[in-house]
Every structure is written in C-alpha cells, then in structure tokens.
Image (cartoon, rainbow, N blue to C red):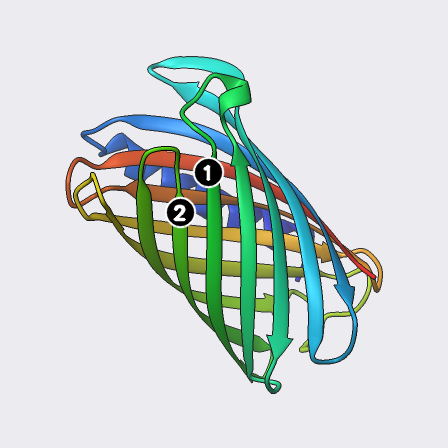
Amino acid sequence: MAISNIKLLFSLLVICLITGQAFAQNSFASLGESDFSIEYEFSDFYSIDLTIEPRYEIYEDDEFAIANQHIDVELFQSYRISKKYSVDLGIQYRFREEFGASTDEFRLTEQFNITKKFLAFRFGHRFRLEQRFFEKSTEIRSRYRFGLDFPLNGEELDVGEAYFATSSEFLYSVGNDTKPELDNRTGAHIGWQLSESLNFQVGLQYRFVTFNIATEHQLYFLSSVEIRL
C-alpha cells in the first residue's frame, strides 16, 4: 500500500477521534505512552517479555503541559499451546508516587489468546484477568480485546514493510471500595518490521473511561519499540 494510503488511514482516524471529542459532554484529556520491550524466545513454545512503559500527560483541564504520570515495569511469560492458542502470566509494578500521583500499584495478570488467520488478515481474541493491589485497596479487572492486523504489502509481512493494526477492548473493574466500572479502548496503529528482530509502531487510542458512571474521554498517542532475541 502506498504511503499516501497510509496517510489517509491516519487522517480518517484523526478525524473520527476529533469528531468524537467535539461531541463529548464530559472531561477530556490527552496522554502519551512510549514503551520499550525485549522478548527472548527460549523455544518455539516458551518466551519471556520485559517491558518498560512511561505514561505522560499532554493536555488536561484546557491546558497543554507535558508531565510524567507513572512508569510501568512488566514481565510476561508466554506459553504457546498451538499455532492458535497461547497462555500468558505476568507481573507488573507501576511507579506513581515518584511523580506526585497516587500510590504505587502491583499487578498480577493471567491471559488467554486465540489467533486466527485468513489470507493476509490475522484476527486475535485476548481474554485477560488482572489483580491490582494498591496501598489500601484491591481491584479485580477482566478484559476482552478483539484485534485485527494485516501487512500493507502482499499477504505476508516481510522485513522493511509496514502493517496496519486495529483493536477494541472492553474492561470491567470491581474494587473493594469503588463501584463497578466499565471502560472501552479503541485504537489503530501502523508498524514497521525494520529487521527480523526489530519492530517499531505508532498509533492512536481513544478511551471511554468509567462510561457507566461519569464518562471521561482520553486520547492516547502511542509508540513502541520491540526487540526479539
């Protein structure tokens, strides 16, 4: 797919996001996340992934201001059952207090993935259960994400080529001192397979936070670098 078509995809997404925000009646904020991850494959069936991901505020309360919000450190183990199914177990620590925000968070994650491919299109279902531990509270969160990705040239992704990915995820959270919360995260990315072991990706994601209580609208600018060893 030509560069002009890639620009068109992003232009359409930006228009949709801006239009959605224009009709929003509640609070709006814009944030950014940039993650760096290293994946090491021990075998065809087992791998580990270490990720460092800072989050920073860009726009809030009608003001532009770049400010760090937190930094996540994540370690995931992936067990591939077959070409279609895999199971992941993860631990995560979120550093918040250093940036003047709320308390730090420790998180455990259990995940089940289903991946199917049709021609150039790859479909993915992700089911995730999280236990989030804060200083004075605990939260259980279930998540379901449907994703689709495909190369922008041909049916297979080769080195030096780009791909497009989109997904939508629903989240349900229950805490011991909060009301149940419903969230939705929908976004799109364009990535480049720079080498056999290096991948770069940029994208946008729109989040409807606690839309069953009082909706907060958040637009995220995302970027990631992935290294496979």
Q: Is residue 113 above or below residue 228?
A: below
Q: Secondary structure at mark 2?
A: strand
Quadrant of the rendered image containing residue 102: top left
Amino acid type assigned to the residue bearing label 2 in the image: Arg
Can residue 16 be seen at all in this image of the molecule? no
Of the pair 2 and 98, the residue shown nearer to us: 98
In screen coordinates, is 96 left or right of 20? right
Of the pair 111 and 27, the residue shown nearer to us: 111
Of the pair 222 and 126, the residue shown nearer to us: 126
Mark number displayed over residue 70: none
What is the distance, in whole Å, between disc 1 and disc 2 at their CAs? 7 Å
The x, y position of residue 8, in whole percent, is 54, 49
- On the image, numbered disc 2 is attached to which residue? 132
The x, y position of residue 32, in whole percent, is 53, 32
Residue, x 40% and y 40% (percent of image)? 15
Q: Quadrant of the C terminus?
A: bottom right
Can residue 63 be seen at all in this image of the molecule? yes
Q: Secondary structure at mark 1?
A: strand
Amino acid type assigned to the residue bearing label 1 in the image: Glu
In screen coordinates, is 107 left or right of 185? right
The x, y position of residue 62, in whole percent, is 35, 14
Furthest toward the front, the residue is 136
Instruction: Identify the mark nearer the N-term, 1 or 2.
Output: 1
Mark number displayed over residue 105: 1
Q: Quadrant of the N terminus?
A: bottom right
Q: CB of mark 1 within 8 Å of CB of mark 2?
A: yes
Residue, x 39% and y 37% (percent of image)? 134
In screen coordinates, is 160 left or right of 217? right
Q: Is residue 56 above or below residue 170?
A: above
